[in-house]
Amino acid sequence: MSTTTIILLIVLAILIVLFIINAVLSVRGVNIVGEEEFSQNLRKVQLVDLREKDSYKHGHILGARNIPLSTFNTRAKSLRTDQPVHLYDQNGRTALRAARILKKQGHKDIYVLKSGIAKWTGKINSK
C-alpha cells in the first residue's frame, strides 16, 4: 500500500470516529423511550407530532400539536423550556433532529418515541 492510501485511510477513520462521537453527544440528555413510558402523563407535557400536516390529519396521538420537522427550526421557539417535551414522528428516526434543536434552545426534559407512531397502540385522533 502506498503512503497516500494509508494517509487517506487514517483520515477516513478519524472522520468516522468524529462522526460517531458527535452523534452520541448530540443525543445525550434525550430520553428515547418506548410507548409505555412515553404515554405516561401525556396531558402534562408538550406533545409534538413532527410529521407533515397531511399525515397529522390522517391520525395523531390525542393532544398532539403538529409542528412538522420542515418548519421546526422556527416554530420550536413556541415550546416552553420549563415543561417536558414529547416528540414523535412516523418511525422514530427524524425526531432526534428535532430533539437536538430543542437541546440547543435550552430544553432539558426531552422524550422521543422510540418506534414512532407507526407502532403506537394507544388512542389516536383520526378523521
Image (cartoon, grey):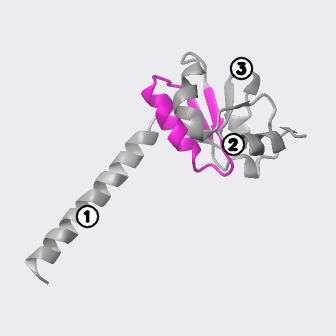
| Mark before the other along the chain sequence, 1 or 2 | 1
Instruction: Give the x, y percent position of residue 85.
Output: 61, 27
Q: Classify the position of the N terminus by image quarter.
A: bottom left
Q: Is 76 or 37 nearer to us in this picture?
A: 76
Q: Is 94 or 26 nearer to us in this picture?
A: 94
**Magenta residues, as a range?**
85-112
Distance of label 1 from label 2 (alpha carbons): 37 Å
* Residue, disc 1: 13
Residue 21's place in the image compared with 106, above or below, is: below
* Residue, disc 2: 52
Q: Are marks 1 and 2 in contact (CB under 8 Å)?
A: no
Q: Around disc 3, counting alpha carbons within 10 Å, would you say few (fewer than 14), some (14 to 19), or many (20 or more)?
A: few
Q: Is mark 2 on a helix, strand or loop?
A: loop
| Mark 1 or 2: the one toward you | 2
Q: Are marks 3 and 2 in contact (CB under 8 Å)?
A: no
| Mark before the other along the chain sequence, 3 or 1 | 1
Instruction: Give the x, y percent position of residue 88.
Output: 66, 40
Question: Is-magenta flag for residue 81?
Answer: no
Q: Quadrant of residue 45?
A: top right
